[in-house]
Amino acid sequence: MQAELSRRGFLRASALVGGGLLVDFSIPLEAAESGAVLNAFVAIDASGTITIAARNPEMGQGINNGLPMIVAEELDADWAQVRVEQADLDPTRYGPQGSGASMSTMMGYTPMREAGAVARDMLVRAAAARWGVAVDGITTSASVLYHKASGLSLPYAAVASEAARLTPAKSAEVRLKSPKDFSIIGTKRKGVDTPRIVKGEPLYSIDTRLPDMLHAVFVAPPSPGAVLRKVEDTQAKAMRGILAIIPIKGVQAKGTFASSVDSLTDGVAIVASNWWYAQAAKEKLVLEWDESAALGHGDQAYAARAKALLDAGGGKVAFKEGDAKAALAKAAKVISARYDYPFLAHNTMEPHNCTAQYRDGKLTFWAPAQQPENGRKLVAQCVGVAEADIVVHVTRIGGGFGRRLMSDFMAQAGAIAKALPPALSGRPVNVLHSRSDDITHDFFRPAGWHEFKAGIDDQGRMTAFTNHFISFGPAQDPQFFANMAPFHLPEGLLRDIEMTHSVFPTVMPLGAMRAPTSNAHAFVFQGFLDEVARAGGRSLPALILDLFTTDKVYGEADKAGETPRSFHTARARAVVQKVMAMSDWGKVPHRKGIGRGFAFYFCHRGYFAEVVEVGVKGKDVQVRKVWAAGDVGRQIVNPHAAEAQVRGSILDGLSQALDGAKITFENGRVAQSNFHDHPFGRIDRLPPVEIAFVPSDFPPGGLGEPALPPVIPALANALYDATGNRQRSLPFTL
């Protein structure tokens, strides 16, 4: 009889199977001793429980449901018998294990189907051998094998051990299902972690508890680039529960994700028997910092410099077709406007934390990392431990939104664990940021400034377009997180267009925020295009549909005509028309104090058009309803999670616009410290949302991000419709 398959047993056994895409290799016989392990993703125990490994970090987006559902579909598993386990970091075995840029389903859809299909093929061949029948005569359904001609049937568990001893077929040798035969993919499934979340059971990184665990606070520099000069810790050491105070020397990493900022800074670790003792001791610690690196860097100084650059005009040409300046000179009417948006912090619900243990030259982490492999690379450089000697247990993440793409918290925990004095050496240490530290030491969504000009003819059609974008960069081009998205309407769809940028340096740490760059640029582009449309006596949907009249694929394209940056006018046109029909656009009489706004945006291989209806009374804004139409490819794995992603994106966008959040700073020191001065939208702000997905015959696209960008300009345009006041700055003010 098979032994019950434990999580560690499954992971140890699947570690034996090798690398690649995890479906084209043989499993040694020894693997079966820990249960019937069919490949790195699938194991079946004697009770019939099917354990499926979830390779990507889960942060609320539902990927630890989605990818296992894909495996289970091709396996023909009974979902009620499926148990999902989070995989530890091992990209050689599992393939890419990051969560970000809405890429997890895009990258995992086909490999996960193949993993399930190869495992099913092994079960079928094992049953055929036992029954002495041809493979072609066996069918499967809900974890049961059937031989119709003889009337025989067996549950998967009955032949799992024999199947585990077979050589897996190559991925290309197995037949994948037709989508019309799907019984799991495309059905609504509740989150596999939902019962534990509802019951408050330990699940997140912050819940990590290990024997003899220590607790630590990392005192980070008060401003970017600050260097620690002196530590006076006499009073802090004398406080109750304090076990060690350790200065940490910063290390600048190279070649890691966004390595210019994702590094280990100077700091001081306060190690205690519990976190509260460490946090209290922080107040008694006297530190001397050299903060000269950030002198003169303030949000107001940046705004003044941006204004001067816009006034000066020019800038480096980033994209140009035709002669926009000449076309503007010939236009019947020229519309111009300036837009801007502020720095923002992420406000993740789970404060940043990480647990690390250094023992016998090896580091083990329990980490809420969106990109655990990049985290391991960063730790190797900053802490001086070889990547091969670093183990990362990936925990559930209490909100990522791009912040946990950066792994500074892993570097901090690793450095502290390695630097523990001999009396504490080898014990695990949990490093937890306070909410204040979380906000003031974020990797911020960068601010930006734009000047637009557009020309229209006497029919209200757009004939020319220019944009001068002011951002941050060390030379002539914006740095990674402060650049433009790869595509912006009307780029590539207008004869005369020119986009330029000017940059200046910043010391502020910048990072990705949900729908990076798009979350801000959709507002400025679609807000201005609404102005252009109204100046010509038209609606924004009509103006945009003009650009989509001819079927065209713009941007990068592979042989199949599709990459994450391929823009299809036909797909765009379909979602615009869909949301217009859903909302009765243009058919609802205008009412005093009630406004409607529209916006469209494309990013992360997702097309979304949205309509927002608002009611305004004085300075009070009520978002009455949102309609959202999206095209994210031919297959939505879990509609329940997909709808949740759209609603969450809309709430995030409404919050950025209406709740007043922005980061301000002087000489690099951030003024905001908590939700009272950097607020975050609560669930009661979410209005009724009507969602429709427009089917198309394209690979799966992103869902975690593309629904966010259009809701902000749609709201801005609705406020204009209700009040006549144009919103050109975030957050909005009435």
Image (tube, rainbow, N blue to C red):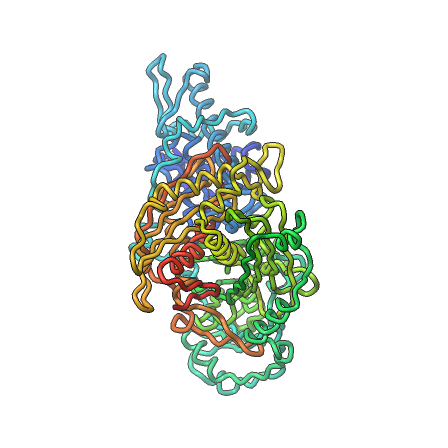
Residue 283 placement, left or right of 226: left
Does the rendering let one see residue 514? Answer: no
The quarter of the rendered structure image containing the N terminus is top left
At 62% from the left and 32% from the top, the residue drawn is 559
At 42% from the left and 77% from the top, the residue drawn is 277
9, above or below 511, in the image: above
Residue 168 placement, left or right of 715: right
Residue 603 in the image: state x and y as whole percent.
Answer: 52, 48
Closer-to-camera residue (497/31) = 497
Residue 166 in the image: state x and y as whole percent.
Answer: 51, 27
54, above or below 427, in the image: above
Residue 530 in the image: state x and y as whole percent.
Answer: 47, 54
At 48% from the left and 52% from the top, the residue drawn is 536
The quarter of the rendered structure image containing the C terminus is bottom left
Residue 58 in the image: state x and y as whole percent.
Answer: 44, 51
Closer-to-camera residue (514/200) = 514
553, above or below 480, in the image: above
Q: How many marks?
A: 0
Does the rendering let one see residue 45? Answer: yes
Residue 309 placement, left or right of 236: right
Q: Looking at the rendering, which quadrant does residue 614 occupy?
A: bottom left
Q: Residue furthest top?
A: 149
113, above or below 219, in the image: above
Closer-to-camera residue (276/496) = 496
